[in-house]
């Protein structure tokens, strides 16, 4: 099971970006999916999270500007980022807290705490 994030880039202040993170493998279900970010010299922080049923949570700095969503059929989570600010500049990471999947022998297994490689978001004029 792997997570692959994409969609980062350079954007001007006030602009928008949409990040995607797709989980691959023989996945049966994914519990909570999250987006974290880590700015230079700072600790990694939770940006937003979404349960399998669609309940969401957001960090205060992004409330009203970012929207997290997911497509369970595609095992994909998205982060729509609007009204971007320079302080949003960071490497963004997707995370799945637990994933149920079929192993090579055809048995269901449950793994925890999966991370994708980060995607860099730079907000600058």
Image (cartoon, rainbow, N blue to C red):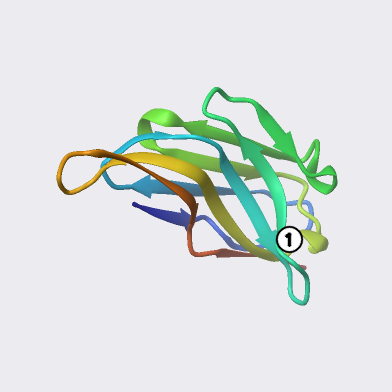
- Crowd class of label 1 (few under 14; some 14 to 19; many from 20; radius 10 Å): some
Quick check: 105 left or right of 51?
Answer: left
According to the image, label 1 marks what residue?
12
Q: Which of these two is toward me, 50 or 31? A: 31
Quick check: 6 left or right of 120?
Answer: left
Is there any visible trace of residue 122 in the rendered image? no
Indicate the position of residue 3 as horizontal and vertical percent values: 42, 53
Q: Which of these two is toward me, 30 or 21? A: 30
> Vertically, is 79 above or below 31?
below
Residue furthest right in the image: 60
Residue furthest left in the image: 105
Indicate the position of residue 39 as horizontal and vertical percent values: 73, 68
Q: Quadrant of residue 54?
A: top right
Q: Which of these two is toward me, 15 or 32? A: 32
Residue at the location (48% across, 42% down)? 98
Residue at the location (67% across, 49% down)? 16
> Vertically, is 45 above or below 122?
above
Q: Quadrant of residue 48?
A: top right
Indicate the position of residue 65 as horizontal and vertical percent values: 77, 40
Q: How many marks?
A: 1
Is there any visible trace of residue 73 in the rendered image? yes
Quadrant, the C terminus: bottom right
Indicate the position of residue 59 as horizontal and vertical percent values: 79, 44
The kind of secondary structure element at disc 1 is loop
Residue at the location (80% across, 39% down)? 63
Residue at the location (60% across, 43% down)? 79
Quick check: 78 left or right of 110?
Answer: right
Residue furthest top in the image: 53
Q: Which of these two is toward me, 16 or 59? A: 59
């Amino acid at each position: 099971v792997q997570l692959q994030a994409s969609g980062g880039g350079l954007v001007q202040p006030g602009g928008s970006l949409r990040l995607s993170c797709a989980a691959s493998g023989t996945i049966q279900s994914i519990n909570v999916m999250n987006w974290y970010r880590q700015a230079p010299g700072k600790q990694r922080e939770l940006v937003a999270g979404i349960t399998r049923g669609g309940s969401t949570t957001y960090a205060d700095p992004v409330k009203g500007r970012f929207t997290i969503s997911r497509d369970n059929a595609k095992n994909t989570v998205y982060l729509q980022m609007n009204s971007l600010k320079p302080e949003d500049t960071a490497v963004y990471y997707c995370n799945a807290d637990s994933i149920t999947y079929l192993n090579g022998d055809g048995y269901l297994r449950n793994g925890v705490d999966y991370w994708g490689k980060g995607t860099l978001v730079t907000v600058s004029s």
